[in-house]
Image: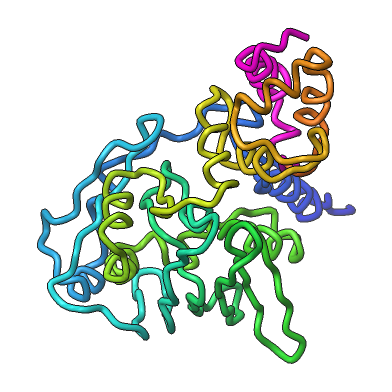
Amino acid sequence: KRKKPRRRQARGQEAKVAKAVAPSRTSKRIRGETPEKFDASSLASTSVANRELLGAEDDDQVVVVGRRGRPRSQLVLPEHDIKAPFTLRSIGVTVWSLGEIYRGEWKNKFWSSTGCLYHHAYPVGYKATKRHFNRSYTMWIEAGDRGPVFFVREEGPNPLVFKGEFPTKPWTKICVHKKLGTRISGPLHFGFSDPCTQSAIAKMYNEGEMEAALAGSKAWNDVLSPQEKAAKDFMEIEGVGERAAMALATTTALGGTRHGDRKSLAEWAARDGGEKLKHFLLTSEELGVSTLRWPLWRAKLVPGILSHLGCET
């Protein structure tokens, strides 16, 4: 008798199971699923090795509530200076250089989101290395025109360099390049999610920057350029975030000139009932692709911005 191909059938079943549980790069929110609840208590547990480096006691790390009720860790200043190079053994990241705090125009863009685990500066010149995917990676930060640029280089005979405007962007590009179907936390891999790194960076803050880091507030320069002043004014409009405010403050697409405040923009927009401004808000790449693709931006925020400026379209 011919034996039944049981093994082949079993392999087929294994393949179906593997396909069913294959990781997806799409977030649970996009798939319509409820994401896991964040356990704030987990923030209080850091590795023993890192606590020894920091010089912190067991109850030194404090969890505060940040933007939208998200947990945010409070800075812990070390009893001694933490100087590079140092290794974060809990995540296998070696920080070779802390870089310098950027204090030029658009300084606010060189800081993390106020909703991050830590609200902190992205020092220009920061450099770290990490072993991942059985490869060695070098990470560093450079200054772009209106914000930091994050680089990750895969070392080897033919090095590959990936970059992006946020820490996660270059790591996401690596995952896509390798067709891994997974996601990576950029702040974690850069070393920014560790209290030791944050404490070391905090040593470079001036008084205003320390206040911003502790309070989770925007870190603007004491003396603002005309475009920075305009951006701060535009951010008073409900629905206008930092990226959109910068676009409105720097663009010359709205009448061929830059607008210094809401009054100037409203007067120009009123000439045609806000049609040109509406077109800019819905189509201009200066606002960023992610903003233009955001359904709420088109459906609710843009109409609200136009209404705030006295334009009913």
Quadrant where the C terminus sits is top right
**In this orientation, which residue lies closer to the viewer: 155 or 282?**
282
Residue 107 pos. (x, y %): 49, 57
Q: Residue at x 43, y 53 (%)?
A: 223
Q: Is residue 40 above or below residue 88?
A: above
- How far across and how far down the image is residue 127, in percent? 49, 78
Side of 31 where 66 appears, left or right: left
Q: Nearer the viewer, residue 13 or 72?
A: 72
Going 63% across and 15% down the picture, which residue do you hit? 304
Is 205 situated above or below 20?
Answer: below
Task: Kindly tell me whether residue 160 is visible in this rendering.
Answer: yes
Judged by its main secondary structure, the magenta piece is helix
Whether residue 43 can be seen here:
no
Position of residue 232 relative to residue 101, above or below, is above
Indicate yes or no whether the magenta region holds residue 39. no
Residue, x 83% and y 50% (percent of image)?
4
| Bounds of the magenta segment | 287-313
